[in-house]
Image (tube, helix red, strand yellow):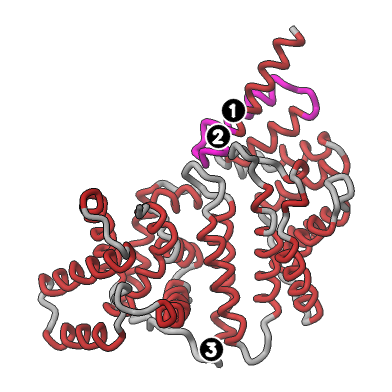
Amino acid sequence: MIHLAQIYRADWGRLLAALIRALGDFDVAEEALQEAFAAAVESWKTDPPDNGQGWLYATARHKALDKLRQRSLHAQKMAEYAVETSASGSALGVVDDAEENAVVPEERLRLIFTCCHPALGLEAQVALTLRTLGGLTTEEIARAFLLPTTTMAQRLVRAKAKIREAAVPYAVPTAADLPDRLHGVLSVLYLVFNEGYVASAGESLLRQGLCDEAIRLARVLLPLFTEPSADLEALLALMLLVDARREARVDRDGNIVLLPDQDRSRWDGERIREGLSLLGRALRRGAAGSFAIEASIAAVHAEATSAEQTDWLQIVGLYDRLLALHPSPVVAINRAVAVAMAAGPEAGLVLVEEAAADLADYQPWHATRADLLRRLGRNAEAAESYRHALRLKQNGIERRFLEGRLQALAEESLIRG
């Protein structure tokens, strides 16, 4: 039985990359692929294909050809497209697994470097990458950016138009240009990873496909450099060290397990060892940016045998460095949590309150404030903060966690009463 939703999550990026490569047009490729998925919803009920990905690619390709004809593109473009498709065997139902695996990584690299071209602003780069490689809806991307859906839709339209008007090449930069283009790509990869690690919408905490894609693309980037990139090594280390916790982040019933309560025996030791090794190399090469600092924070957690054994003072010091490098209310909240672990919830709450004006619509701010108030025994205030957090849109599993906290406070009040 083919699960269309699973294919959408896992294969949207590679299907779209192949179509864009063939067509050279983001809009035509994306529209055709969307229509192919819509057609599959009905068609597969009665006649499910053996190769779902191949069916989707072939259907999208035919729809794209129709669109090109309807738009009266000149015959030469049609001929070039037909020849390219025939020569490459790019219909996913035709190429064998070995050939497909050899081609796809390069296609995805072309796509991400196109999405992350410096002609676009960083937010547009991230949004376009999440849309094209990650397959997120415009509404999901808008939630991740704390923006109205209409605003994000306009930004995506403008970003694709700018790529078309500026004739941004669908290609991996040359070795000489690669270092200048790297920072934008790394920033985007990390934001894609974060969206996968804590999904902004849906009923699962994780969108593991996005985490895996960000890690995989970072691995593919590494050998492109004649001189190893310390920042790239630091980012890959960070993603591996954080992703190593994935199995322990939810219990058997799918409920969130916070970091201090996680069963560390379920952490992925192989990923931790690789991440620590990469981080060591990056630091020896002089990496001192935000990825290196965040990876160092993740390393402190990874090396501690329990939450009680964690060196929280070292983590606070690392957050001090991160805050000095990139002042941000979100970083300030993370630092406040570390301070609360090192010096108590009262000290953390003072810092959280200082960020109130900047994060009034940021759901994690309210959830963090609620937790610190709960730990201080200020249950009525904690309950109000939990309710405020619930009023803000978030991932379904996070909602259940907050509802559970609120219910626990209500039960405690009944017992005390």
**Magenta run includes residue 382:** yes
The amino acid at mark 2 is Arg
Mark 2 and mark 1: span between their CA atoms? 6 Å
| Residue 149 appears anywhere in the view | yes
Q: CA distance from mark 2 to mark 3?
A: 45 Å
The correct choice, above or below, for 380 with respect to 396 in the image is above
The residue at the point 88 percent across, 53 percent down is 311
Residue 304, percent from left and from top: 85, 54
Going 58% across and 57% down the picture, which residue do you hit?
A: 194
Give percent across and percent down for residue 362.
58, 42
State if disc 1 and disc 2 touch (CB < 8 Å): yes
Residue 324 visible? The answer is: no
Residue under label 3: 177
Instruction: Classify the position of the C terminus by image quarter.
Output: top right
Q: Residues within 10 Å of mark 2 (few under 14, many from 20)?
A: some
Q: Which mark is residue 399?
A: 2
Q: In the image, which is nearer the foreground, mark 2 or mark 3?
A: 2
Residue closer to the observer: 179 or 84: 84
- Picture residue at 35% right of the left edge, 72% below the top: 162
Q: Secondary structure at mark 3?
A: loop
Secondary structure under tag 1 reads: helix
**From the viewer's perspective, is residue 193 above or below residue 146?**
below
Q: Is residue 294 above or below residue 417?
A: below
Horizontal arrangement in the rendering, residue 374 relative to residue 187 (left or right): right
Badge 3 amino acid: Asp
Q: CA distance from mark 1 to mark 3?
A: 50 Å
**Looking at the rendering, which quadrant does residue 170 occupy?**
bottom left
Mark sitting on residue 403? 1
The part of the chain drawn in magenta is 375-400
Q: Nearer the viewer, mark 1 or mark 3?
A: 1
**In terms of secondary structure, where does tag 2 sit?**
helix
